[in-house]
Image (spheres, rainbow, N blue to C red):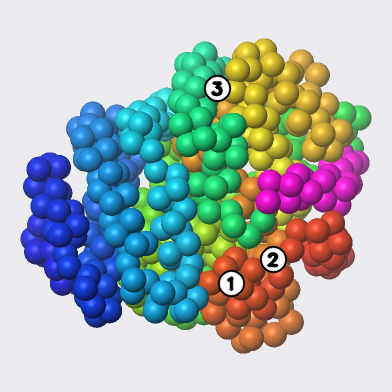
Amino acid sequence: MRRHYIPAEFKITTWDLLQPYFDDLLAFPVDTSDAYNDFLLRVSELESMVSEDLAWRYIKMTCDTTNPELEASYIDFVNNIQPHIAPYEDKINQKINDSVFKGELERDKAYFIYFRAIKNSIELFREENIPLQAELQTLSQKYGTISGAMSVEIEGETLTLQQASNKLKEVERERRQNAYEIINTRRLASKKELDELFDQLIRLRHKVALNCGFDNFRDYMHRSLGRFDYSIQDCFDFHEAIEKVVVPLNRHLEEHRKKTLAYDVLRPYDLAVDPHNRQPLKPFRDGAELLEKTIKCFDVVEPQFAKNLKIMADKGFLDLDSRIGKAPGGYNYPLAESGIPFIFMNAAGSLRDLETMVHEGGHAMHSFLSEHLRLNAFKNAPMEVAEVASMSMELISMEGWHVFFDNEEELKRAKIEQLEGVIATLPWIATIDAFQHWLYTHPEHTLEERTAEWVKITSRFDSGVTDISGYEHYLANSWQKQLHLYEVPFYYIEYGFAQLGAIAIWRNVLRDKKSGLEGYKNMLQLGYTRTIPELYEAGNVKFDFSTAYVSELFDFVWTELQKLKS
């Protein structure tokens, strides 16, 4: 995006140099309708510049958590720039909200959504929360530093935990058990440090909520995340639907796995291995090959998707390989000024990495499809929609997965694993979300109470088939591997809602590829210019998480899974 109001050569180094641009916005006259429109464009341009600057600081830091200068650059923004921006943003929001010209634009649904978010931000703004938010951002990034430093030695080889997880697919059961114990023992070595970090985050988050007049951080985040289209009770109802519909399917899969493996007891290190004891699928060797094959895969699905990925590759806007010192996880980071997103992940040659790549690729396509929208705020789709972009791509990209596999049998195995993963993922999503509801409505809980509640919730959504005897201490600590709990609280139930949307999109594509893809693209190119139900409707799917609808969609998934197995 070309700048119109801010010099192209300007770079954010200090608050003193950035502040005049915020002062100019506050002084800018909005005495006509045209001036008000111009003002909104200026706000959008400044937002874009600031967000991209922060994005690059975060990207560089997560790509190398061992570099103190990169960490210092990110923390400098969080502590010395962002706190100054917050009160200006509130004043700018009030200027936008109070204008007599707002009503003219509000008749446009895109602006209605935008102004609704502005009003929500004004109502939630508290001066006393500015230093708390800065402290929270600084603390939450420590999770990546701690996790990025985790490595293990297995059979004489030093591996990241992502690389080590591939050992859980080994045919020899003793090797899997050894890898499972080494990985989890390493996680336990950082348990105390991560517990103490989480205690700090809980305390500060609760204080933020109280400052805004909420009883707890859960209720505050429901408002802060702009969940206007569903309630807290809807989350609980969705948990129940997953428990009734999806958990029994997962139980069936694990029972079948135990029977196929001919084991008397299924253990936690038996869940990733091929049930027919075939060697693990290796769809690619390294990040370069993963990128090359994903471009070919996307070309099968929709040639424009492949062209977009090539643009990212040409710009160097990807960091795909796993390595020690790199933060865990994967993400797609939209870059508001560049108009091209950045994909970060930890590829180690597994099928799961292929799934991550096409998932983040789906997010990237969302960024490209919504780039045309007038204001930066219009492009920031809610996560309930953004995750449909990514999770749909996991399913619709299967059409092109043959580029990763040499024979039909391996391709079929990969698709089976993908669909079984869809079934296994929903109970975990419900587990994490239910845990967060408890955590923040019981902010004074002890470590022992937290552990007990985690074990209780996991048992609710567990299949009951896998025997964890002797590994109870690993289970009690397993929540710590979920990055979202530390870095982006309450961002998780969206994956569940979006999984339903993704299944429905995939079903549409299988029925009629042209119209199904058209619906998918229609949904994404709207960004956040419609309500969530309206965005789903644009994709020819329903925003519905009733037990009946969950059952309908998972009956479809189960049918497709049985076709592959027949």
Residue 43 screen position, x and y as percent: 26, 63
Residue 299 makes an appearance in the image: no
Q: Secondary structure at mark 2?
A: loop
Start-end of magenta stretch: 231-259
Depth check, mark 3 against mark 2: the one in front is 2
Q: Quick check: marks 1 and 2 in contact, CB under 8 Å?
A: yes
Predominant secondary structure, magenta span: helix
Circle nearer the N terminus (3, 1): 3
**Residue 502 or residue 284, whichever sits in front:** 502
In this figure, which residue is indicated by the disc labeled 2? 543
Q: Residue at x 26, y 73 (%)?
A: 36
Q: Which residue type does callout 1 highlight?
A: Leu
**Residue 504 or residue 76, whichever sits in front:** 76
Residue 106 makes an appearance in the image: yes
Residue 535 badge: 1
Q: Residue at x 82, y 46 (%)?
A: 240
Q: Which residue type does callout 2 highlight?
A: Phe
Q: Residue at x 42, y 25 (%)?
A: 146
Q: Residue at x 63, y 17 (%)?
A: 445
Above or below: residue 153 compared with residue 404: above
Q: Which residue type does callout 3 highlight?
A: Arg
In this figure, which residue is indicated by the disc labeled 3? 187
Q: Quadrant of residue 535?
A: bottom right
Between the residue at mark 3 and the residue at mark 1, the CA separation in whole angstroms equals 40 Å
**Quarter of the picture holding the C terminus:** bottom right
